[in-house]
Amino acid sequence: MKEARLLLYSAARVVFILFLVIHLVYTEFFAFEAAQIMPSEVLVSKSKNSNISEETILFDEGKSESLQHELQKQDSSLEVLLSRLVPEEQRSEFESSGLACDSAAHSLVCVVNKPVKIINSGSTGVSVVYESSQSAGERTIVRPYARQEDADLLKSVTPVEILSQENSSVKQGCHYNHDVPAVLFSTSGFTGNLFHEMNEIIIPLFLTSFQFQSHVQFVVTDHKASFVSRYGRLLSKLSRYEVINPAANRSIVHCFPGAVVGLKFHEFLGFNSSEIPRGYFMEDFRNFLRQTYRLKAQNVSAITKPNLLLISRQHSRTFLNENQLVDMMRTSGFQVIVAKPKRMANLAKFAKLVSSCSVMVGAHGAGLANEVFLPAGAVMVQVVPLGLDWASGAYFGEPASDMGVHYLEYKIEPEESSLINSYKRDHPVITDPTRVLYNDYQAGRALYIDGQNMKIDLARFKKTLTEALKLLG
């Protein structure tokens, strides 16, 4: 009887311990999940000087050593993090006035290190009102899109007015207090095109916000639900809070301990580690993508079979003999995957597909921006149509080396272009595309970008594929 009671007591202890373990796991799991989806509106404002602890860093496994070392050694107070986005020569004035704007490298970014109110002002755009102990300065207008040199494009971007409380007619108090800074940007511009989305929003957003280690709130003007949905996984890794659309309720005032208006831009699909914020490299971004989308193959050596991904265009710069091209690729030893636009619609799934390929082939176009998902050591082959030499190299060729991707160009001959059917061999459209584009860019664009297809010389292109196989070893 005594032994039975002892056995019952031991069993009860085991059950109790299991209960405690399950309870702790359950609590931690749902606390984490709640932190990922908790609307920022429920947050209560804390001290502006609160530090971001190392425990909040989400991407240790995915960061390159250089970036992780920098994040660990830097002061993580909000003032310091905001000041990293300000040129050194402006930092003294920034600390006293609370506002600094940097117009270097194509972009315009304004940083506020004072408490701010953000409100949709209706037809005039969005207002960012900050507290200032100094005399009221001039109002600053920013159209928060990373590329500022296209005046016509910027007309579609809602203006954001930055002004001190003294200059503002906004007298309401805060409807919602947030204890993290705001990063305000637009999803207008060239959204709907993968290259421009990566080049002018996603990479600049990473540059601007990654240092906050998800303790940042995105405020999106010209809010496009399709963009937020398409890049939802990336956005949720950069910020643990739901995106705010200020146009959804024009009477609501959101208050933050600081703000960044606009996004940093360095170069086409790339980073310049010497530009503000310093210390970022393409490999940091690619590691971030690999972790976000759970991409397995970090290096092409992990791929056992030579998978070739062919980006198939449907409306311009198409391969007129695509079926024959695919057959030739297969006889050259590749397992060929043809990716049409519908297949590329789901970014998360397509990123995994791209990362499983050792070679990617495509005509100059937005689909080649998928090179960011290729494993290191892979080969990208860009087919360059007539007239698009510079854009092909600048947009996709030059960035490839920083990604650790081999880059090959196949420049078509005039006889491979459909333009040869409309213009004689000695016509300037054929012999001097650069001059045609220079004299009338819109007319040239209609010819070379929108009005040109290609019939590839299979024998000549096979030599390029042979070179790709050599690069793969």
Image: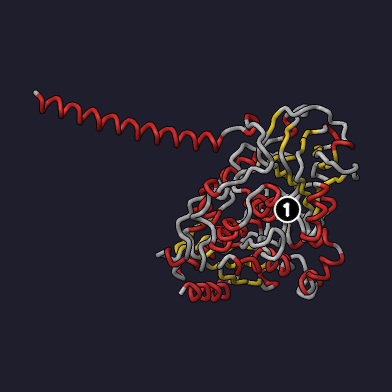
Residue located 81% across and 42% down the image = 160
Quadrant containing the C terminus in the rendered view: bottom left
Image quarter of residue 203: bottom right
Residue located 90% across and 43% down the image = 135
- In x, y percent, where is residue 39? 61, 32
Q: Is residue 27 left or right of residue 230?
A: left
Quadrant containing the N terminus in the rendered view: top left
Q: Nearer the viewer, residue 469 or 180?
A: 180
- In x, y percent, where is residue 253? 75, 30
| Circle 1: element type | helix
Q: Nearer the viewer, residue 77 or 408?
A: 77
Q: Residue lying furthest top in this view?
A: 1
Q: Could one spot residue 446 in this view of the protein? A: no
Which residue, given by chain and number where applicable, does mark 1 sit on? 83
- In x, y percent, where is residue 87? 77, 59
Q: Residue lying furthest left in this view?
A: 1
Residue located 84% across and 51% down the image = 152
- In x, y percent, where is residue 363? 63, 63
Q: Could one spot residue 450 in this view of the protein? A: yes
Q: Residues within 10 Å of mark 1 (few under 14, many from 20)?
A: many
Q: Amino acid at mark 1?
A: Ser
Residue located 85% across and 36% down the image = 165
Judging from the image, the colouring scheme is secondary structure
Label count reads 1
